[in-house]
Amino acid sequence: ASAAAFAPAQNGKAATALNARADSPFVGELGAQAPLGFFDPLNVCEGFDQAQFDRLREVEIKHGRISMLAVTGYLTTAAGIRFPGAEDIPDGFAAWGALAKTQDGCNVLLQMTFFFGLAEIINRPAEWADVTPEFPGDYRNGALDFGWDNQTDEWKMRKRAIELNNGRAAQMGILGMMVHEQLDGKPFIFFDKFDIYAPSVGN
């Protein structure tokens, strides 16, 4: 028998198909990075032009920003931190029902709804300001800078990549916490080992 029969199987072709779409026009876009490269196994971006891709990227960034805030809020309330007057409001999904039971709670829900609407209006390109966004998700609208325009292109790309990856992780994180809370009332599965689970979750 040939020695080749004992050689390890070659799976480079399959790995390439899994890891990246080398033929895509978006392989050089932000977020297409090691180890997966431009990862689009379902061919969602097949036939997309740049405008369509940028729209998906803007939605991804916005969802990531919201998820980062959601994870922070989830952890903060689970730690027992509350606004004055809200000490008896539980954290997690139970907070919705508790707020709806009182007039003050309903007022809070109304304020939250107003804030969400205002945030949605503000966090978008201001077409009336005649300002062209520098990249998808750039909502500065010529009013905010904090030194951004003084930085190099390499620095900007690095910061944008960090935000994108943190947003991706936060989207998975908040989804995981919500699912686990619904399954057994314990969204923070890693806390079990330390016996420091917040008692107010789900109460």
Image (cartoon, rainbow, N blue to C red):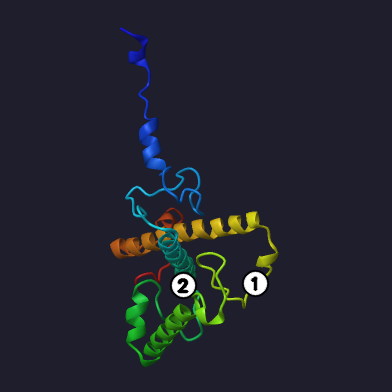
Q: x, y (%) of residue 113?
A: 40, 84
Label 1: element kind: loop
Q: Which residue is mark 2?
A: 77
Q: Nearer the viewer, residue 9 or 197?
A: 9
Q: What residue is drawn where x is 60% and y is 55%?
A: 158
Hey, what amino acid is under mark 2?
A: Thr
Q: Are marks 2 and 1 in contact (CB under 8 Å)?
A: no
Neighbor class of circle 2 (other Cα within 10 Å; few <14, some 14-19, many 20+) is: some
Which residue is at a point 51% across and 49% down the rendered structure image? Answer: 28
For the point 64% across and 54% down, which residue is it? 154
Q: Within 10 angstroms of label 1, few (less than 14), some, or many (20 or more) residues?
A: few
Judge left or right: residue 159 versus residue 29. right
CA distance separating discs 2 and 1: 31 Å
Tell me the amino acid under the disc marked 1: Asp
User: Residue at image x 64%, y 57%?
Assistant: 153
Dividing the picture into quadrants, the one containing residue 140 is bottom right
Q: Callout 2: helix, strand or loop?
A: helix
Residue under circle 1?
Answer: 145
Disc with the residue nearer the chain's start (2 vs 1): 2
Pick the front one: 127 or 151 = 127
Residue 100 is situated, as x and y percent measured from the top left of the image, at 33, 85
Name the disc covering residue 119, or none: none
